[in-house]
Image (cartoon, rainbow, N blue to C red):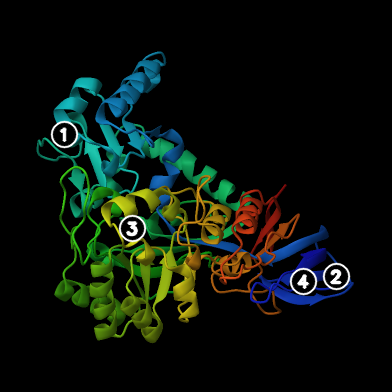
Amino acid sequence: MLIRQVRPLDAASGALPSRPLDVRLRDGVIAAIGEDLPRLPGEEVLAGGGAVAIPGLWDQHVHTGQLAQAHARLDTSGADGVGVILELVRAELAARRETPTEGSLALIGFGHRLVDLAVAPTVPALDEATGSVPTVLIGGDAHHAWLNSAALQRLGLPPRDGILAEEEWFAQVPRLAELPGVAEAHATGAAMMQRQALQRGVVGLVDMEWGRPWEVWRERAVRMRIRTAVYPAQLAHAPGPTGTALDAAGMVTMGPLKVIVDGALGSHSAYTREAYSDGHGYAGRGVLTYGPEELVAALSRARTQGLTAAVHAIGDAAAQVALSAIEQVGIAARLEHAQMLTDEDVARMAELGVIASVQPAHLLDDRDATEALWPEHGRQAFRLRDLLDAGVELALGSDAPVAPLDPWLAMAAAVHRSADARPAWHPEQQLQPREALAASTDGVTALRTGGRGDVVLLEENPFADVPRDARGLLVESAAREAAQRLRETAVAATVVAGELAVQA
């Protein structure tokens, strides 16, 4: 393929060429970049029309199985009480009764947050609203689910009164396809997911789904690059070291071992050095789901198998446990979420070469909860600027479906840390747009000869630097406008491995 007349952007410097250039792609890589390259016999031509060309975008943290089901799920996000959720469930089931074929299908919901509920969800309450329809309502942070008795029975779980949380819930996630209608919805959603990602300029995903996602991807029509994680329970079945090609085209590769050390803020389960404080009387320190010795053992097995590690740590105490284990084992690793960090944690990440895999859109949802549950600790949350200045590599993602699979939203949140009319939350941690881009391209900061043939064409350049004020902070109004431009960015075309995937 020959891409005509584009302006390749260097994310490291923000520089654009003075004149449009041509980009030749051959055998999945960039073969040449220059002015007026001659068309070779049989070469496909894509007219760039002066578009800005950037490296392909990546989402470094996605749960593709859950995301693939999102189109068929009941949206419970924003529900601020158990009664509100139950009304949504009743309305959905009433609508389904008008279509006989849907009446017996399982009801899967997603989005509510325990931190927003004054009354705890119970199985009897959900049973009253759902009857015999298997129902699973997944929390918006994906760390718990509220099941009715019919769903518990279908999955072979004993009766209970409350929710399933953390490891107990994670073990059931791969089994949701056993519920009626879920597998069919999953197949349809997987195709939709890839198409929508490509339309946003995403050429690759790191799939953090539970189970054996590499087996699932082998059965799909793969249109983008996929790295599949493996969890400790499936470590013996990992098909090879990190980087191993798992399909004939090399589009699906083995990724890291994923270990979840603690929970999430919204479920009161992120493991912190100091106790939570909230209006419902909870004052614990969260949950440590993987102890230090157990974590060292898992990372050691992964290192022996040639795997890198991705260690989930949201609370600062969890980060401390994770970094100590990473250092002891000497494994190449990422800290997933890295949401709450002390100065010591940031310095250790830089010293150990640990990548910070962060989901900036989470700060939009967690801003108020952080101030309520971890008062006076907001400065420790989402320390993007501190991490970058310390020399820590940033890798941005979404944690979809917890947040949308949308790199433009993630970059906008990193640039202007606010989802509403309020000024940026801890503006000292903002990134410049081009810095957010550099953290969204899997380490590729510019299109260069010999590099991967993944190219995204944009109608405009939303990556100009934001001016700073007298304090050295990004000017508030300019940062807000820059974030808005990022959210509104239009992708003209996405090319993956030298082939046109989508075009506007």
Query: To which residue does mark 4 refer?
Result: 16
Q: Sequence-wise, which precedes: disc 4 or disc 3?
A: 4
Query: Which label number is shown at residue 426?
Result: none
> What SS does tag 2 mark?
loop
Figure check: 54 above or below 301: above
Identify residue for label 1.
153
Classify residue 214 by image quadrant.
bottom left
Q: Please report whichever mark, 2 or 4, sits nearer to the chain's N-terminal start.
A: 4
Q: Which residue is mark 3?
A: 212
Would residue 282 be seen by someone viewing this image from the given angle?
Answer: yes
Decide which of 49, 32 is in the foreground and name it: 49
For the image, the number of numbered tags is 4
User: Label 2 belongs to which residue?
Assistant: 40
The amino acid type found where label 4 is placed reads: Leu
Question: Answer yes or no: do the residues labelled 1 and 3 have beta carbons within 8 Å?
Answer: no
**Sequence order check, earlier mark of 2 and 3:** 2
Describe the element under mark 4 as helix, strand or loop: loop
Query: In the picture shown, does residue 202 fall above or below 184?
Result: below
Query: Measured from the top left, where is residue 177 in percent x and y?
Result: 32, 41
The amino acid marked with disc number 2 is: Leu
